[in-house]
Image (cartoon, helix red, strand yellow):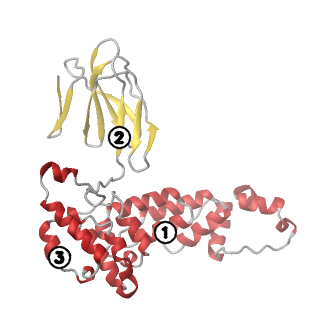
Amino acid sequence: MVLASCSPYFYAMFTGFEESRQDRITLQGVDFHALQLLIEYVYTSVVEVTEENVQVLLTAANLLQLNDVRDACCDYLQSQLDPSNCLGIRDFADMHGCIELLNHADAYVEQHFAEVVQFDEFLNLTHEQVVNLISSDRISVPSEEKVFECVVAWINYDVTMRQQYLAALMEYVRLPLLSQEYLVQRVEKEPLLKGDIQCKDYLIEALKYHLLKGEIKASFKTPRTIPRQPVGLPKVLLVIGGQAPKAIRSVECYDLREEKWYQAAEMPTRRCRAGLAVLGDRVYAVGGFNGSLRVRTVDVYDPSTDSWSTCNSMEARRSTLGVAVLNGFIYAVS
């Protein structure tokens, strides 16, 4: 009865399936030690997640629909993300439908791309997985050189089998963003590229891009001339207050990674035409118009707790003002 009350899997088994009439039940695909830990958890509400048991424990908890244990395993794996293991954790999360862990692993890979590609997990990816990674606008790299070098390294890891994928991968290397010197001294001399007509076309495109000037260069657009735009976590867009003459308390938040809008905590006071500034890890809504008159109040948003507070007001009432931060001070100008 305890198992059935805690696990939808066991509830279904004991109430509707043939197993409910059997004295002994065999569970397929469940690790014995993981099952033992989960049964103990059902009776004690305690389970210890470790490096040694986290994978089998998550697999079993997922099957038995013990969501609290599954979530604890996901939290543990998230805390262990590292350039040497993040690709493996990402695949594990994808395999078991752990969406939040998958999103965090994806973000970690993108943010630490330059370090991730130095480890064997990257070299053991399939060519489809490499394409998926290097085609992203969000990977963070000091320069496009790192992307080119990782493609060369991946091909050379098993050149006999992987040479066929060279052009398909080079399509996503943004060669025009490399310096002209690097293109001539490194890319053009790379042995892998010699004899590959498609790769030569990509190189010619990049060199041509460097010869263009002014408006002609600005109008020369291909997927390879667009700079990458890495987005770190957490990074959001806040829309605060209303548009004159409608002053409101509403605050909305756009998550740039998930591409979704969320409602955030409302401001303590209604305002529009406010000045906004970020100082430290707080957002300041300064002055503005409350629907009747200009205000001098200042509200402060803490994104870690999704809450607002009020700090010292300005000496003068200001609306439609400019706000800037310099050396730890907020300046309001109108």
Q: Position of residue 146 (x, y in %)?
A: 25, 69
Q: CA distance from mark 1 to mark 2?
A: 29 Å
Disc 1: CA contacts within 10 A as few (<14), some (14-19) or many (>=20): some
Residue drawn at x 59%, y 61% is 46
**Mark 3 = which residue?**
186
Q: Which is more toward the observer, 68 or 164?
A: 164
Q: Position of residue 83 (x, y in %)?
A: 35, 69
Q: Nearer the viewer, mark 3 or mark 2?
A: 3
**Mark 1 = which residue?**
91
Mark 1 near mark 2, Cβ–Cβ under 8 Å? Answer: no
Q: Mark 1: which amino acid?
A: Asp
In the displayed structure, would residue 101 be above or below residue 37?
Answer: above
Q: Position of residue 168 (x, y in %)?
A: 37, 72
Q: Is residue 148 left or right of residue 20?
A: left
Q: Position of residue 157 (x, y in %)?
A: 34, 84
Residue reaching furthest right?
21
Q: Is residue 131 left or right of residue 118?
A: right
Question: Which one is earlier in the sequence, the residue at label 1 or at label 2?
Answer: 1
Residue drawn at x 25%, y 74% is 200
Disc 3: CA contacts within 10 A as few (<14), some (14-19) or many (>=20): few
In the displayed structure, would residue 195 be above or below residue 41?
Answer: below
Q: Mark 3: which amino acid?
A: Arg
Checking the image for residue 237, the label placed there is: 2
The mark tally for this picture is 3
In the rendered image, which quarter contains the C terminus? top left
Q: Nearer the viewer, mark 1 or mark 3?
A: 3
